[in-house]
Image (cartoon, rainbow, N blue to C red):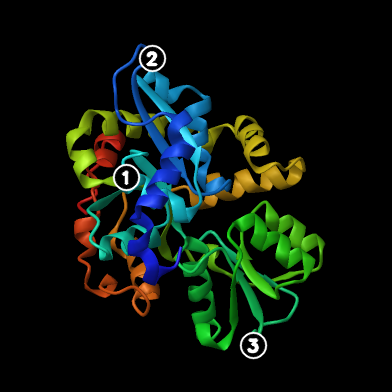
Amino acid sequence: MKPRGFTKIASAAAAAALALSLAACGSGSSGSASGTSITVSYSEEVADELPLWIADQAGYFKQQGLNVKLVSLSSDQGFPALLAGQTQLGSMGGSQILSGAAAGSDVKVLAALTPVYPYELWTKSGSDLKGKKIGITSKSGSVYIATLAALQQLGLKPSDVNLVPLGSTTNVNNALLAGTIDAAVSHPPASSQFAAAGFKSILNLAQQKSPNINVGISGKASWIDSHKDTVSKFMAALKQAFAKEKSDEQYCVGILQKHLGVSDQKALQDTWQYYAKQVLPANPAPTVDELKSAQAALAGSVSGVDKLDLSKLIDTSFVDKAWGTSSGS
């Protein structure tokens, strides 16, 4: 999804294509014998999404009276699906939300599943990356925002390198291993493959704990306002999933293996350890500081993003209720 072309994503053709792709997945918030039905998207098969997968597989959504259909939509489809009402909530990066808000969409961030950059910068080229090819998923996603943060720390501007959009994290990882790009940010379980193949981590963003909504739960403000009970139940199920992720390694490794398509048990255990113990927050209430990194990165390419009042894009009330806290955001 290109930032300058963001307003084009709501075109009739795109909406029609999304409607067809989601028709079999359910839509809307309607009562049924199995509970209230909603469709929730997530952009990639990455471990950031583990709380959603747990809540689904462990039956926590159903315990709350929700029939949640999880659908995987790439980052250039997830936001337009949300705007069109084909999904009711979406798990996506803060950059997508800010791009949409700058284009006039009334959206809210409700929770931050990954409130930091969960990445390391991997390469065989050493720390001098000037003129090198660096893989990204798109020029608006979380990988892009993290890559800009890494380049800044290395004293480089985006124009100093060749940023190569490859569509997905899997494509980026495979391109690095194949040698068609020189560097990329990534996270477990791919880290194990990179290390085994002789790549070096030259910058660890995750250790720095810099605030950033790499993955967060968002929705249209109008839908949220008219479905507060549904959102409250969704967050209650998510809290149960957080507790499960932090405490049950064997269960989580099984889910990760299914979704990530990885059979290496050591890599899967390392992935669980990394996310459950280092990345997953105790309280997922989003903050203004977590949106600032995306705002700074997009300021030069997305019209109006620098003028956004970030506090108006955040609603912590549902997390506060589920977690029994008051974030004060």
| 169 left or right, relative to 59 | right
- State the residue position of label 2: 34
For discs 2 and 1, the disc positioned in front in the rendered view: 1
Question: Residue 13: where, in percent of width, then height?
Answer: 40, 51
> Looking at the image, which residue sits at the far top?
33
Does label 3 or label 2 sit earlier along the sequence?
A: 2
Q: Residue 180 carries which label?
A: none
- State the residue position of label 1: 84
* On screen, residue 23 above or below 192: above
Residue at x 76%, y 63% (from the top left corner): 195
Quarter of image, res 179: bottom right
Q: Is mark 2 on a helix, strand or loop?
A: loop
**Which residue type carries mark 2?**
Ser
**Local crowd at mark 1 within 10 Å, few (<14), some, or many (≥20)?**
some
For discs 1 and 3, the disc positioned in front in the rendered view: 1
What whole-number distance in Å separates the C-alpha atoms at marks 1 and 3?
Answer: 40 Å
The quarter of the image holding the C terminus is bottom left
Q: Is mark 3 on a helix, strand or loop?
A: loop
**Which residue type carries mark 3?**
Gly
What whole-number distance in Å separates the C-alpha atoms at marks 2 and 1?
Answer: 24 Å
**Which residue type carries mark 1?**
Ala
What whole-number distance in Å separates the C-alpha atoms at marks 3 and 2?
Answer: 55 Å
| 286 left or right, relative to 261 | left
**Local crowd at mark 2 within 10 Å, few (<14), some, or many (≥20)?**
few
- State the residue position of label 3: 131
* On screen, residue 88 above or below 122: above
Cβ atoms under marks 3 and 2 closer than 8 Å: no
